[in-house]
Image (cartoon, rainbow, N blue to C red):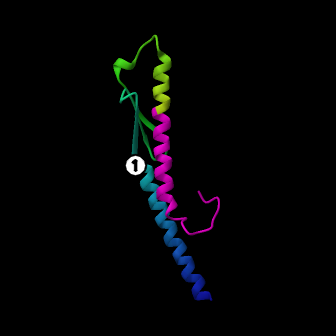
Amino acid sequence: MKGNMNNMMKQMQKMQKKMMKAQEELHEMTFEASAGGGMVTVHANGKKEITDIEIKEEVVDPDDIEMLQDLILTATNDVITQIDDKTNATMGQFTQGMNMPGMF
């Protein structure tokens, strides 16, 4: 029984190291999303930090600030969704088959 417990602890430590490595790799990834046919592009890293926003000059219309705001919101929300999807797909491999609610 004791040998079984030690083996299980080693497996858990191995899995924890793999999870931490996967999370580090996610944080280093870059993501981008565009709106308005590329008029606004938002870049972010895997930590959900916005690293850059590109706005094409022709979309800047002082009489229609609302459209520009909408494009920025759309691209930002899209990039965050991409990060969430990638995080769930990557980290989900560690919880498959385990009945551990609330892990992620």
> What's the magenta bit mostly, secondary-structure-wise?
helix
In the image, residue 93 above or below residue 85: below
Q: Residue at x 46, y 65 (%)?
A: 18
25 horizontally vs 2: left or right: left
Residue 4, given in percent of the width and then of the height, sits at 58, 85
Position of the N terminus by quadrant: bottom right
Residue 30 among those drawn in magenta: no
| Rendered residue at 49%/63% (across/down) | 93
Verify whether residue 89 appears in magenta: yes
Farthest right residue in view: 101
Residue 94: x and y in percent read 51, 65
Q: Pick whichever, 8 or 59, lies toward us.
A: 59
Start-end of magenta stretch: 75-104
Q: In which quadrant of the rendered image does the C terminus lie?
A: bottom right
What residue type is disc 1 on? Met
Label 1 residue SS: loop
Residue 36 at x, y = what percent?
Answer: 40, 27
